[in-house]
Amino acid sequence: MEARAHQFEDAEQQQDAATLGMWVFLTTEVLFFGALLLGYSVYRRAFPSTFGEASRHLDIVLGTVNTAVLLCSSLTMAFGVYQAQQGNNRALVRYLLLTMFLGSLFLGIKFYEYYEKYSEGLLPGSAFVWHGSDTAHASIFFLFYFILTGMHALHMIVGVCLLLVLAIRGRLGRFSASYYTPLEMGGLYWHFVDIVWVFLFPLLYLVDRSS
Amino acid sequence: MSTEQPTWFTREHYLNASFGWRSWLLTTDHKRVALLYLMTITVFFFLGGAFATMIRLELLTPAGDLFQAETYNKLFSMHGIIMVFFFLIPSIPAVLGNFLVPMMIGARDLAFPKLNLLSWYLFVAGGVFVLWSIVAGGVDTGWTFYTPYSSMFSNTNVVLAILGIFIAGFSSILTGLNFIVTIHKMRAPGMTWFRLPLFIWAHYATAVIMVLGTPVIAITLALVALERVWGVGIFDPALGGDPLLFQHLFWFYSHPAVYIMILPGMGVVSELVTTHARKRIFGYSFVAFSSIAIAVISFLVWGHHMFVSGQSQFANLMFSLLSFLVAIPSAVKVFNWTATLYRGSISFSAPMLYAMGFIGLFTMGGLTGLFLAAIAVDIHVHDTYFVVAHFHYIMVGGTIMAYLGGIHNWWPKLTGRMYPETWARVAAVIVFAGFNLTFFPQFILGYLGMPRRYHAYAEEFQVLNVMSTAGASILALGYLLPFVYLIWSLKYGPEAGTNPWEAKGLEWQTLSPPPTENFEEMPEVSEAAYNYGSPSPSI
Amino acid sequence: MEQGFQLFPRQASTFATHVDRLYLFLTGISAFFSVLIFGVIIVFAIRYRRRPGHEAIQVEDAFSLEILWTAVPAFLTLGIFVWSSSLFLYQSIPPKGARDISVVGQRWMWKIQHSNGRREINELHVPSGQAVKLTLTSQDVIHSFYVPAFRMKQDAIPGQYRTLWFEATTPGEYHLFCAEYCGTNHSRMTGRIVVMSDVDYQSWLGGGMEHTPVETGKQLFTQFDCASCHESGERRRCPTLGGLYGTQVELESGQKVLFDESYVRESVLDPNAKVAKGFPAVMPSFRGQVSEEQMLDLIAYIKSLAPQQQRELVEGANR
Amino acid sequence: MRIYVLVWVLLLLLLGITVSAAYIPLGKLNPVLAVGIAATKAALIAAYFMHLRSTARLIWIVATAGVVWLAIMFTLTAGDYFMRGYLPKPTVWQQR
């Protein structure tokens, strides 16, 4: 897609189309996660104390650290796109690698959390172990925890792969101050995934810490 | 101009620009993708039709004697799943929309041709899973997949079918995304929003629903599959879940999905009416904005599917009121189409017959929707044949009539050939008659109280059921006819020429069939749509 | 039961005439507009048919017409909304003193219990001229209790209670259908509604020698060993249940919930989801041990421990 | 560049606030505050990192549409769950 594709009149039209397309895609993602969040909210409202109790089983330190890591990765990504606009290919690749590192760190911590939950028997299903009272709804909490963060992690993995491709292409000098659309798209995607987490973190980890 | 016109064979166009299966399966030309879709959904249409035929045969007699109960349940489930997700939703957008949207706005292609091809592959992949689920023994949940039946009780191939719908959903999202970007960014110079054909407005509205609604059904059905496979409770009350939550999420998409099916049909009819009456559309901006209004309101009304589910009474009242709102833009459209005919030069060509049938049948379908929005009446007719009749008036009397009318109208553009007009008129009349005989008795059946999805029924319902089955066989004939003569016309139909209907619209200004990049010279637009002459102020 | 060809369903409840009146009005409107649209199309199609010497004449848009045909449907639908909604409110609120009957849907039958304990399957005997309130639930999947002659229908949702009421008018036998698809024999989940005169109903009711739901519930209360805690007066561990039904229970979280059928049900199955304030979460779950019918009996028993006034409170709020 | 750093600092600050606020018992305000802060963070990211502030109005409309549709979904569903048992018993019908 580096040269102007045949269906477009000029490069500006092409970039406009790509940007619009990306945002439309992101709105579908909003609804995708939104439907899950709706389900989560309905149960959270119906069973507040169980959800609070289950939520306190999540590791708040790891969760907070992970949020910070992700916010940092958004910053480095924004820097990367900025360097691309300046046509600064070397700096661009450096920031992309840094972003990928932070993204992988997030995933690493996340998977460690998964492992912990799994060994505590908190993976819903036949092996679910709950020492509290209301097992059924605690299981629903963890179900939503795993689905929501799992879908998010899946998006992160896709994002890291995307950044890898972009970094390679950047290294090969495919981008310039006049052509950096793919980076902008990659950036939009990355920030969006960050936004999703910004909502997941308080909804899952901070449900009922005060009691 | 030379006296010797180049013919179908001597001129290069999108159909003979390249040959071989690779040139089709790897094409990024929106017109070829449209034809790929056309062939695929035709297969699904006749498959779904075959299921319908078997359903109607079973219902000839009150006793469930032709098929076993379980088989019958699979028949109506597969009929619904295939017709809704694999025929109606892609029908007009993915075939006519794909073909016409770039041409009507004066573009060389859609904004993302590769995504467009990908969406076809996703559609086929989804279709393969659904076919697999059929071959493996079918699904018996109904197309609505209500929990906890679908998630815990049915022992049929629910997961396969859900997987198929899930994948096909992404095809729908990509089509919608492509349309939105194309309509915003690819219009020819001078093609302002209010010069767009109404077909484009309708497809824009459709695309909005596809993009905003489809992800919800995808994730919801995925949750059902998860509940089945993993045995965890999300919607199953035995495991602490809430089955009504499923219904909310399901209908959040599946009610707007009805408008994914009908809005493109409305766009087609706006084109057919103007073309074959040689008239400007009456009330352009009202027809255009009513499409957008329908798209938005469609997301506010889903709860009318849940009036007897025991959702809160407040929700019942709220959704009832909002549901009535949809009647307004729909009525505006009907009145404007009818007014467009006034003082026209009305031809009785097959597309026009279909269009007139559409307006009338859609009116009936829409009006019977009022019964369902009125809670007190809906409590009685919910889940009866009244509902079945109502949505078939919209889906079959509406969407399929528009689809057939559109296929006939643009057949010369798609293929460069004319279809046989007499046969086409005969088929249109047969479809109209057969349709009414099939579905009108079902309104009466429904009010009498015959529940839907019944394999065996009480004896007093038989007469009306026999009428319905008789109508269905006429309808089947009406559908087979075009299939035969359209294929026949590919070889024997006379060459159509650029603009056989003398219609306005950019697609008629390029050759038939069009060249690969649609136009030999990129068009510029300087006039409104449907400029069949200037209005005389005296009237 | 009904025989032969029909075009209109029989009317056998107080709703039927009301619903039919609205239905006929809507049919009239639909017929009027359908004929109007088809008629105008046909007239135009003939008058302005394409023929030599006849050209289309373009017409200016008419804003006033657009307003007219936006406003007419708007007012018409608003009117229908008001009419149907007021009728719906009537249908959805059972009158005081309605006869209680409980219904449990289970694939593929309807299990019914009358207030004196008499049980029947796929048949429901009701007196004419008296309001009857059904409490519906389901043992497995969603069913829907549908009596066309009463113009009444309500889904039976597993794990939740829904009510539906009617007043039968004409003695006779009527169809009972399951209207929500529930699996293989969905179309055989049908039955009879037998409407009898009050006298006949009373003698029919007395025909069985069963325990009332309250009595059965009391037995179950002992059988499941509920009584050892909830009646022993060990007030530290759990509340005694007398008089609680219909009150607002304060939870540990400070939240308040209504002590109604659903709360009882939830407390039996997931005892510690909503523990009353001041009590430890020690009750074991009875999930999988109590059938839906037993649950209804238990509820009837617990309900009977509360004064009448409180019970009615629930009926008002629990709609 | 500098604005990015500023936004980033703000984001981390908000993260700190939301975590500590979660431990203060505020009753029903706790979730409202948590979601409110999350929305602020999301708005910051969208406005600055995703350049929503300086982009075409069309993009802004598309982004808003997603949020509006989400709001529709939540509000109307709440119309069911929050309103269960809401309607008072009108006495007019008792006489019918």
Image (spheres, rainbow, N blue to C red):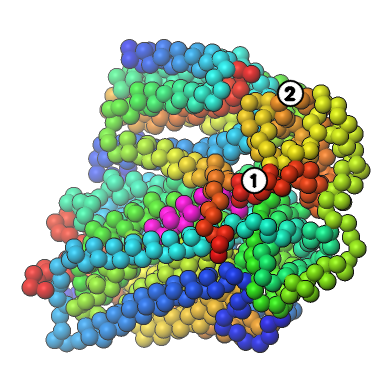
Which residue is painted at 52% across and 42% down in the image? D78
- Say which mark, if any, is on residue D57: none
What residue is pinned by disc 1?
Answer: C313
Q: Chain of mark 1?
A: C
Q: Position of residue C155 (x, y in %)?
A: 65, 58
Q: Residue at x 33, y 61 (%)?
A: C74
> What residue is pinned by disc 2?
C278
Q: Which is the main secondary structure of the residues drawn in magenta?
A: helix
User: Does the magenta run of residues contain B321?
Assistant: yes
Task: State which chain disc 2 sits on.
Answer: C
Quarter-wise, where is residue C245 in the image?
Answer: top right
In screen coordinates, is D91 left or right of B271? right
* Nearer to us in this view, B437 or D73: D73
Please, is residue B520 above or below residue B478 in the view?
above
Earlier-in-chain disc, 2 versus 1: 2
Q: What residue type is disc 1 on?
A: Leu
Secondary structure state at the residue bearing disc 1: helix
Residue at left offset 40%, top offset 30%: A188
Instruction: Determine the CA span between mark 2 and mark 1.
Output: 25 Å
Indicate the position of residue C259 as horizontal and vertical percent values.
Answer: 69, 39
